[in-house]
Amino acid sequence: MAIVYVYEVPRGRGASNELKAVAKYDREWTVRTDDNFQSLESIVAACGAFGQTHPENAESFVKSIDVKAADDSGLAYTVRFQYAPLDAKDKEPPVEDPPAEPAPGDDPVAGLFAYWSASSSVTTVPTFEDVDGAIIANSAKEPLVDGCEKEQAEPKVTFTMYEADIDVWWPWSLFYTNTTNSVVWNGGDINTWKCQGCSGKWLSSNKTWEVSWDFAYREENWNFKPWDIGFHKLVNEDGYKKKSILGDDGRPIKTPVGLFNGEPIAPGDPLRALDIQLYKRRDFFARFGKLRNPA
């Protein structure tokens, strides 16, 4: 079951204008399908989408869509688009395009009305290395195990696009929130961008959802890196059997010692940090494209 053909109706074309204003346009299509229960969303998508620009005027956008059956068969539909300029409150200042980076395929949101904005925020994060990558230690060269934190400013970007139906964008919200990038994205290596979630606002005047996605960047990545220390060592590799680490007095130790592969490290050896992945990884480019100037 599918759409058979899409035909733009010449008599449905029209335009109106006022002095010093961006023109408004009308377009109409006839869409025929071989399924009288073809989804209305797919019928509209065959003609275009909210936010697309008019082919004769890049300042006029699809702001209203009307679809209805053309006859009683349920196989023919009339789709009407109305184009109009954006209201001032809907516009955003241009975002400077960063240097290009390798990315698979074409930008999936190119040609749609969608835009990026950028900011930053300051947070406190755990740390165990100094600016040169050396382990933070006391004057006796003992790593400082607890309480090492640093203040860190993190770049953030917000991607805003428009969706006609909450059933389109809400499942993506559940899919991407609290995940990190699985491919190089917006200048960052894998696992350096984290999706902090999205928010949706219903625009009653346009009958569409304004959906904004927030992403935060962390240069060292989003993994959890605690010290590998403990009171026990592994007896077997599956971890089901452990035994206490004994001190010089032959008794179980009372303070944790450094470990490596489940065994205590030799006195004087540097502590090692674990590297634990906390978040699932998703392909951000496939859904959001990348930073670019407004379409």
Image (tube, rainbow, N blue to C red):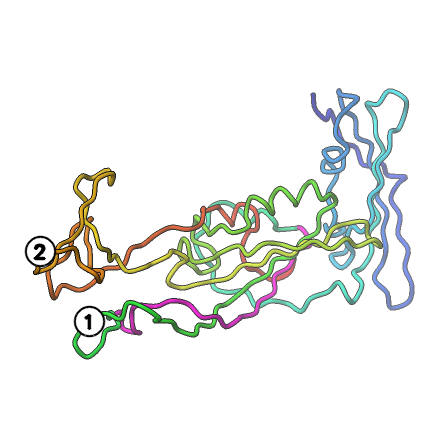
Tally the marks.
2
In percent of the image, x 24 and y 58: which residue is there? 229
**Residue located beneath label 2 in the image:** 250
Q: Is residue 71 left or right of residue 186?
A: right
Q: Position of residue 246 (x, y in %)?
A: 13, 55
Where does the magenta region start and end? 112-133
| Magenta span includes 121 | yes
Residue at x-position 73% and y-position 55%: 201
Name the residue at 59% across, 61% down: 158
Disc 2 or 1, which lies upstream in sequence?
1
- Outermost residue to the bottom: 139
Pointer 2 with pointer 1, Cβ within 8 A = no
Using the image, tell me which numbered label, if any, was put on residue 142.
Answer: 1
Q: Would residue 111 be counted in the magenta stretch?
A: no
Q: Which three-letter amino acid code belongs to the residue tagged 2?
A: Gly
Depth check: give the residue in front, 238 or 119: 238
Closer to us: 217 or 292 = 217
Q: Residues within 10 Å of mark 2 (few under 14, many from 20)?
A: few
- Relative image position of residue 99 (x, y in whole percent): 47, 64
Does 197 sit left or right of 13 as displayed?
Answer: left
Describe residue 119's horizontal placement relative to residue 219 as left or right.
right
Residue type pointed to by label 1: Glu
Judge by depth and name the residue closer to the eye, 222 or 73. 222
| Quadrant location, the N terminus | top right
Classify the position of the C terminus by image quarter. bottom right
* Mark 2 or mark 1, whichever is nearer to me: 2
Q: Quadrant of residue 87?
A: bottom right
Residue 139 picture location, percent across and down: 19, 79
Q: Secondary structure at mark 2?
A: loop
